[in-house]
Image (cartoon, coloured by chain):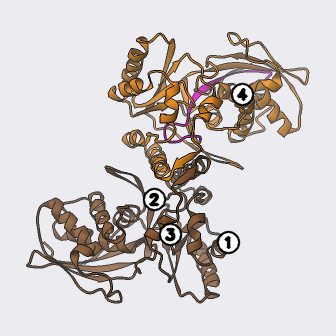
Chain colours: A brown, B orange
């Protein structure tokens, strides 16, 4: 049995336009790197996280620690692990930062223990880790981070996740303006009631998007990405949102919306060249502001957490 | 060029549980038979419809007449046709009666004129015919009737229809209690506002259903059929609805809900044997009432309007 493992846990985009709270996908250009080792105690020990010293290293308050504990509780076996996290996704970015750490942790521990669980089963533990960060159990980042591709979270009780392989030529460009939005704050912006007519348009688009993903119909994916309910309520939190969206659509993106609860904004594109154009367009808009930002481009990844090295 | 054509226009189930106003599929056990002939005038002439003498034969007030006229107007060519309709689907049944006549008419005329339009283009004309019946343009019956299979109506302006082939072993059983419900009346029962949380569950189910149809995952189709918004508001119009649903689910149906705006109720099943069991269960429930009823069983049909004979 391996004693040490290094994993890459990718970022992810949840909500995906019309798919508010039920859809997410994995990206590949950015993610956390984590090294986990079995130790000889029965305690989880998390090293201080470089650059993010305010993230708790107390296992019961850290998403990775909570997720691992959920797995061990289910297994009925207390064991100890040392955890190093190289965090490349800033917390509060809207691209699944806490989910990456929680997912990476449970995939790595599962590997170290000889794979008692399937990837699908691990989603539940990663999701429980996320509760430590947001106070709320959502699987729309955890599922794609663990499994890869697009994931539908159809229902919670019991958890029902459906994975869809991403069309081969589907690229994602994400801009992360370096301002923080709390998920809770973004959630409070939303009306608790929705106009039935708008809800119908939304689930028409959800139907179109899922069909487009299954049939690799890029234009259909693009037409279906529109969100009539959440985006206009939340975009006020994101500087330059309308300019950004106009610019990326003019540059040939299939669609564009808020990633998670923001502030990151994602665009989907057909092919690497379009992704490059969209990257430039995003860069143009934000270069004119004083807000620092990062842009990540990658194919939508059909891989979830990847094992880099086993020692 | 043919002078006369006989077509079969199938019934259809719209709404399909969670897919309210955006989804429908074609059935095969019941439908209208129509004979259309080019005549030497430039007028549309509809023969009195046997058994349904209260249905107007005035072309501007009959769904078939209105649909044909929409086609001719688009073509910019006035021509005359004689139309005989053998109506097997009772108006107000909730299984696409008006849609069948409108769809059969435009497919037949298109054939007689040498196919100037694709089937997809014909949906728009059939839908305009339906306005004559319900006062409202909906394509969730017209699209599957013309095209076959499952059809998503993603958007109206412009009309965006996505066809999905039905899984090969998917059967449908529909019971039609012989009471009439007006679509308008059923629509007025609905709240104009929806709880956001319920709307999210609904589009999660829509996503699951579309994914299940693409991947022929019968269990997923079944799990996803649930409707948290419309069914409970409308079921009050349908006698024995709860008993019926319990009985068909106990008999092994994948799912069950109201067909269109009722009073028909449909169940989806995996395979012919399950469909037989469900048919018996429906029969048991309604045999104990004084309400006359019909039950139709068939595979979900991947055919829309079929040409039976060209003379």
Residue A246: x and y in percent read 67, 72
Q: Marks 1/2: CA distance? A: 25 Å
On whether disc 1 and disc 3 are found on a single subunit, the reply is yes
Give the left or right position of residue A296, taking residue B84 as reference: left
Which residues are the magenta region? B1-21
Q: Is residue A161 magenta?
A: no
**Residue underneath mark 2:** A21
Disc 4 secondary structure class: helix
Q: Quadrant of residue B140?
A: top right
Q: Nearer the viewer, residue A2 or A126?
A: A126
Pointer 4 local density, CA inside 10 Å: few below 14, some 14–19, many at least 20: many
Disc 1 secondary structure class: helix
Q: Nearer the viewer, residue A271 or B92?
A: B92
Q: Marks 4/1: CA distance? A: 41 Å
For the question of whether residue A78 can be seen, the reply is yes
Pointer 2 local density, CA inside 10 Å: few below 14, some 14–19, many at least 20: many
Quadrant containing the C terminus of chain A in the rendered view: bottom left
Residue A27: x and y in percent read 44, 71
For the question of whether residue B152 can be seen, the reply is no
* Chain on which label 2 sits: A
* Chain on which label 3 sits: A
**Residue underneath mark 4:** B133
Seen at 56% across and 36% down, the residue is B24
Give the left or right position of residue A239, taking residue A52 as reference: right
Disc 2 secondary structure class: loop
On whether disc 4 and disc 3 are found on a single subunit, the reply is no
**Residue A204 position (above or below residue A71):** above
Mark nearer the N terminus (1 vs 2): 2
**Residue underneath mark 1:** A246
Residue A297: x and y in percent read 51, 76
């Amino acid at each position: 049995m391996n004693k040490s493992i290094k994993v890459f846990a990718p970022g992810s985009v949840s909500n995906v336009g019309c798919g508010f709270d039920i859809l997410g996908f994995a990206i590949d250009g950015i993610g956390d790197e984590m090294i986990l080792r079995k130790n000889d105690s029965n305690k989880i020990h998390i090293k201080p996280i470089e650059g993010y010293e305010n993230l708790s290293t107390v296992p019961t308050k850290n998403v990775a620690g909570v997720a691992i504990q959920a797995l061990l509780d289910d297994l009925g076996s207390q064991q100890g692990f040392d955890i190093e996290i190289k965090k490349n996704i800033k917390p509060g970015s809207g691209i699944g930062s806490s989910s990456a750490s929680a997912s990476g942790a449970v995939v790595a521990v599962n590997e170290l223990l000889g794979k008692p669980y399937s990837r699908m089963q691990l989603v539940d533990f990663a999701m429980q880790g996320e509760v430590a960060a947001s106070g709320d159990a959502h699987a729309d980042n955890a599922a794609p981070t663990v499994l890869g591709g697009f994931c539908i979270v159809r229902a919670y009780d019991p958890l029902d996740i459906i994975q869809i392989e991403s069309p081969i030529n589907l690229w994602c460009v994400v801009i992360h303006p370096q301002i923080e939005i709390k998920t809770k704050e973004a959630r409070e912006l939303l009306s608790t009631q929705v106009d039935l007519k708008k809800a119908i348009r939304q689930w028409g688009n959800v139907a179109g998007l899922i069909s487009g993903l299954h049939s690799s119909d890029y234009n259909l994916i693009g037409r279906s990405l529109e969100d009539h309910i959440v985006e206009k309520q939340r975009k006020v939190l994101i500087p330059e949102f309308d300019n950004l969206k106009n610019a990326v659509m003019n540059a040939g993106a299939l669609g564009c919306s808020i990633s998670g609860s923001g502030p990151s904004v994602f665009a989907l594109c057909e092919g690497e060249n379009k992704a490059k154009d969209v990257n430039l367009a995003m860069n143009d808009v934000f270069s004119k502001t004083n807000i620092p930002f990062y842009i990540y481009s990658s194919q939508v990844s059909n891989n979830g957490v990847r094992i880099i090295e086993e020692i």
